[in-house]
Amino acid sequence: MGQRVGLGYDVHPFGHGRPLILGGVRVESHRGLTGHSDADAVCHAIADAILGALALGDLGKHFPDTEARWHGASSVGILEQVVAMAAEKGAAIGNADVTVVTEEPRLAPYVDAMRERLAEALRVGMDRVSVKATRPEGLGALGQGHGLAALAVVLVETP
């Protein structure tokens, strides 16, 4: 098999009245992320990385926010659809590594649950999924708590 690498990035502002969903897991927080779907930046970044590795465009091409059917959609469900698209091309996920950039909330208590849920969605063992978090130390909009970003790199094995 061949190998391809994809890089994904997603950012969403915080907003009130929504749950915070990251990596398919509900994270205890007084505010969630705003977006057309459930705004799970972790799943969005990983899905974009897979699409990029296979030169299939980006998430917006396949799941546009102009379509009502994606309003409030589960991002882990979208990720599962992207994995299915990859499988249709004979590709499989080798591993995924994601970093979440946010001042708060602290994500350490949720990392293993995220890894487990993402591994299921990616059709790989949990030992092939890494989730890390870092703080921007007060710098910029993310450091001031206005939003959250996720960066992902994925290795895709191709025929």
Image (cartoon, helix red, strand yellow):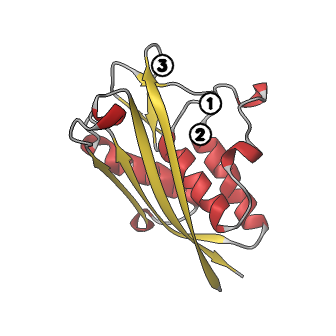
Question: Which of the numbered marks, if any, corresponds to residue 18?
Answer: 3
Q: Earlier in the sequence, mark 3 or mark 2?
A: 3
Q: Secondary structure at mark 2?
A: helix
Residue drawn at x 58%, y 59% as measured from the top left: 49
Which residue, as the protein is rendered here, is positioned at the far front?
Answer: 140
Vertical position of residue 105 compared to residue 116: above or below: above
Residue 92 screen position, x and y as percent: 64, 70
Which residue, as the protein is rendered here, is positioned at the far bottom?
Answer: 1
* Image-based side of 100 in relation to 71, left or right: left
Asked whether disc 2 touches disc 1, contact meaning CB atoms under 8 Å apart, the reply is yes
Residue 86 screen position, x and y as percent: 71, 64
Real-space CA distance between mark 2 and mark 1, rounded to the nearest whole angstrom? 7 Å
Real-space CA distance between mark 3 and mark 2, rounded to the nearest whole angstrom? 14 Å
Asked whether disc 3 touches disc 2, contact meaning CB atoms under 8 Å apart, the reply is no
* Camera-side residue of 152 and 108: 152
* Image-based side of 8 in relation to 36, left or right: left
Using a 10 Å C-alpha cutoff, classify the residue at mark 3 as few (fewer than 14 neighbours), some (14 to 19) or many (20 or more). Answer: some
Residue drawn at x 56%, y 45% as measured from the top left: 44
Query: Mark 3: which amino acid?
Result: Arg
Real-space CA distance between mark 3 and mark 1, rounded to the nearest whole angstrom? 11 Å
Q: Earlier in the sequence, mark 2 or mark 1?
A: 1
Query: Mark 2: which amino acid?
Result: Ser
* Image-based side of 84 in relation to 128, left or right: right
Could you say which quadrant of the image residue 52 lies in?
bottom right
